[in-house]
Amino acid sequence: MKPTLSSFFNVSRGAAAALVLFDHVRHLLLADFNKIEHKTVTDHLVYLLTGFGHEAVVLFFVISGYLVGGLTIRRWRQQGPDLAHFAAARISRIYTVLLPTLAIGFALDFCGQRWLNSSGVYTATLGSQLNLGSFVANLFMMQGVLANPLGTNGPLWSLAYEWWYYCAFALVALAITDNRPRRFVYVLGTVALGAALPPKLVLWSSIWGFGVFVALWVDSKLWRPRPVAGLCLFGVAMICSRLSHNVETATYTEPLWTEFSRDALLALAYSACLCSVSGLQVRIPMARFFDWTAKFSYTTYLCHYPALVALVAIAHRTLALDFGLQPSTASFAYLGGYVIILYLYAYLIYWLTERHTNSMRDWLTFYFPQSLARV
């Protein structure tokens, strides 16, 4: 991969994790926009800039499609299918962080619900899914399929989407790259998997597939837009996506096809942006900083919400600080302080878990049945 494109991916991953974090902190700490008593220009700006969490998840899907799907197809075309390496890479990537995150999140929610719920924050965010059955379901990626996300950790829904996209991709890629007659088995497995999964999960797989398409586009000699045009198109698509949401309340829901159409258009714009940036010749500003934040963007996304709820509960218990606050200088400072604490927490979890992903992958590759490599 070209250094500039790799750097842009790191910018995208680091920025997307930050957008999700700011979105969740603001939604929990500050009042919904329609409940603000006296709206100012600053309030409009802060709520706009901290409302891109959903858009960030769409970007994560496209990025994953490129880095997982597109690069795997490139490698399998050159070296032949290697399911053992693919499985080891995906399992180590997901579970090195997921298993500790589930355990820590369960502990935080369990303790918080019983001893730190004087503010009612756990009543508002927890639901009734904190039990061993939900833990096991989330461990096997059944959240959004047969169970809810564990405890307060709502962001886990997108991880299940990712996992099942990996499984479907492996079957499709094997069907494409394997010249033997049994490719029909892989096609049949893909169809069966799609029939078993929820329609929304299956529909959004096309957004993940955009990333695969971009990787093939970048490798080809096809026309691609200029970097300035691609970046401008992406910026406009982000703003349009954000403004087309109902921003009055966080609980608003909309028709499935409306949501998908907006996400698909954003994904297409970001895909065009990636293709255009692949030809960029200048150094990306703050590249080193985003290279650093990208290292633990997955951990940040996965572990922050249970810690956020626990922090809000502790602050209410010890300092009488509430949530659902009216926007003000103090509440904005409160929001910024929480973001800093959560980043420090995420980096600690990364240091204990995610940074060991490569070692875990190598260990799994060594112990996986060699027959998988010859599938």
Image (cartoon, rainbow, N blue to C red):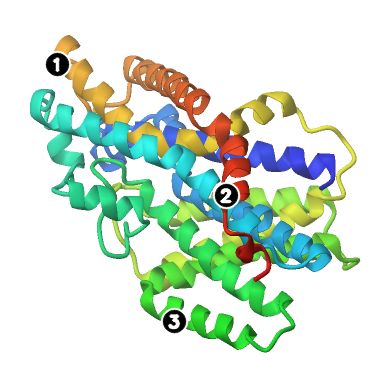
Name the amino acid, label 2: Tyr
244 vs 26, nearest the viewer: 26
Q: Secondary structure at mark 1?
A: helix
Look at mark 1 in the image and give the residue it sits on.
317
Label 1 crowding class (10 Å Cα cut-off): few <14, some 14-19, many 20+? some
Tell me the residue at 38%/40% (across/down).
99
Label annotation for residue 192:
3
Question: What percent of the width, then of the height, locates residue 119?
Answer: 12, 26
Q: How many marks?
A: 3
Q: Is residue 364 above or below residue 143?
A: above
Res 49 seen here: no
In the image, which is nearer the foreground, mark 2 or mark 3? 2
Question: What percent of the width, then of the height, locates residue 181?
Answer: 67, 89
Label 3 crowding class (10 Å Cα cut-off): few <14, some 14-19, many 20+? few
Label annotation for residue 367:
2
Q: Are marks 1 and 3 in contact (CB under 8 Å)?
A: no
Is tag 2's residue or tag 3's residue first in the polypeptide sequence?
Answer: 3
